[in-house]
Image (cartoon, coloured by chain):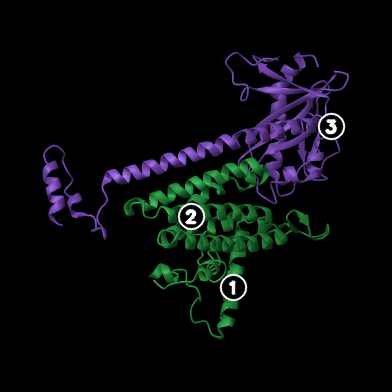
Chain colours: A green, B purple
Amino acid sequence: MKATTPTEDLVRGIWKENPVLVQLLGLCPALAVTNTVANSIAMGLATFFVLVGSSLLVSTFKKVIPHEVRISAYILIIATFVTIADLVLAAVVPVIHKELGAFIALIVVNCMILGRQEAFASRRPVGRALLDAVGTGAGFMIAMLMMGTFREVLGNGSILGVPLFGQNFEPWVIFILPPGGFLTLGFILLTFGWWQERKAGTPRVRQWPHGVATPSREEAA
Amino acid sequence: MKDLPQVESGALESPVDLDPASDASGPPPAPERPATSSGRLIVTLAAAGALAGLVIVLVFGWANPKIQEYRAMVLREAIQEVLNEPETVQTWYVVDGALSRTPAPGADTITAEKVHLGLDAEGEPVGYAITGAEPGFQDVILVIFGYDPGADRVLAMKVLESKETPGLGDKIFKDTAFVAGFREAAAPLVGVKKDGGGGADNEVDMITGATISSRTVIGIINHRIEALDPVLDESGS
């Protein structure tokens, strides 16, 4: 297990190991609810809250939770935070809550969150777990925002409901429908990979720079 | 290690006809660390579950009044909207084919069938706000509409709940031209293609690309009027 600095723990999840764009985790909400910017923000915030809350608790109680039932305990903790987020969203922003529908409840099975608990929070001090969760949560929000902006601008001609183009703009409806989620993710990953490759200075494709199955350094350890 | 399942199956052999295949599955892989007692596992999970339950109950206690309040507000606003801002609104329950100020004995006031009667400043009835729900393209569409039984006219329509396809079916509440088509439309409504009707006052222009959703909305209103018209006419308003 390679030692990491606190800054590395924080920054890693934001870009270099972005959960959606690099690790390809948490794709269900990233594909399903990024059809508008407002939904992306709400989903990003809810996931951020659940991730930070459960990382804190898991890291705090890592010595108390028996190894045999750790996954059940993580799920229990995550599910509690998700229910809280669900109720709070319903009470505070009912309109957005209605739009997100079942996808708030589905944060429970978001493998990005469970992955951070198993791979990081359950083995590190509370402070580091917090930094890691904040970084990963921020990375998730960035990815959600990228997709949400792309899809709302092309699919509805607006940002946060404010029309960008004139009356004559014919919205590219496919981008706010489910297939548009896949197309958008594909384009973003393509750009991301191309950019990474250029930065690395390799002219030919040797391998996908961030293989799906390649675990991050601590996970491999 | 190999002895373990055999001992177990031996003990169980006579009372329970143990499937021999279960022996083949072998013992579970050896744990890397000393096994924790089952008691501790159960106690830990039970305690965590109880705590989680407590937290959720507390949050629910805080959130539920706000959620109910929001629902009531949405309904109140919708009634105002579809009845053109009446002075007062009365709730009437439909009991045995007649209107009654009180629900049938034992009925739940939330789920009981009811209509909302709007009265203007002089106390004259302006119409009833009626809700109706039917399956649309994706999920059930919940609609509220104002209805004047004397003139057999729909006053206005508003979609309360719908999960119709974003960008297509959701035009049943986002497309203002479609919603405006219900204003002062004569009942029963007839859905026509955009600019395809003869201009009769019971025609509602449907939405291109959202035929099923538009048809459902029109259907809900027609069916509810059909069901409630005798009741409302009897009340003499």
- Residue contact between numbered discs 1 and 2, judged by CB atoms under 8 Å: no
A141 w.r.t. B217: above or below: below
Badge 1 or badge 2: first in the primary sequence: 2
The disc labelled 2 sits on which kind of residue? Leu
Most distant residue in the right direction = B122
Q: Is residue B24 left or right of residue A146?
A: left
Disc 3: which residue:
B184
Q: Name the chain letter of the residue that bears numbered label 1.
A: A
Q: Which residue is mark 1?
A: A192
Q: Could you tell me how far apart the alpha carbons at marks 2 and 3 are, in whole angstroms? A: 58 Å
Label 2 environment density (alpha carbons within 10 Å; few <14, some 14–19, many ≥20): many
Label 3: chain letter: B
Which residue is the site of mark 2? A56
Measure how far apart labels 1 and 2 are at the Cα level.
31 Å
Q: Which is in the foreground here, disc 2 or disc 3?
A: 2
Q: Secondary structure at mark 2?
A: helix
Q: Are dots 1 and 3 in contact, CB under 8 Å?
A: no
Can you tell which quarter of the image residue A58 is in? bottom left
Q: Position of residue B206 (x, y in %)?
A: 76, 43
Residue A183 visible in the shown view: no
Task: Quote the CA–CA distance across marks 1 and 3.
Answer: 54 Å
Q: Residue at x 59, y 45 (%)?
A: A101
* In the depicted structure, whether residue A46 falls above or below residue B141: below
- Write down the chain letter for disc 2: A
Instruction: Classify residue B192 as left or right of residue A125.
Output: right
Do the residues at discs 2 and 3 belong to one chain?
no
Q: In the image, which disc is placed on residue B18?
A: none
Q: Secondary structure at mark 1?
A: helix
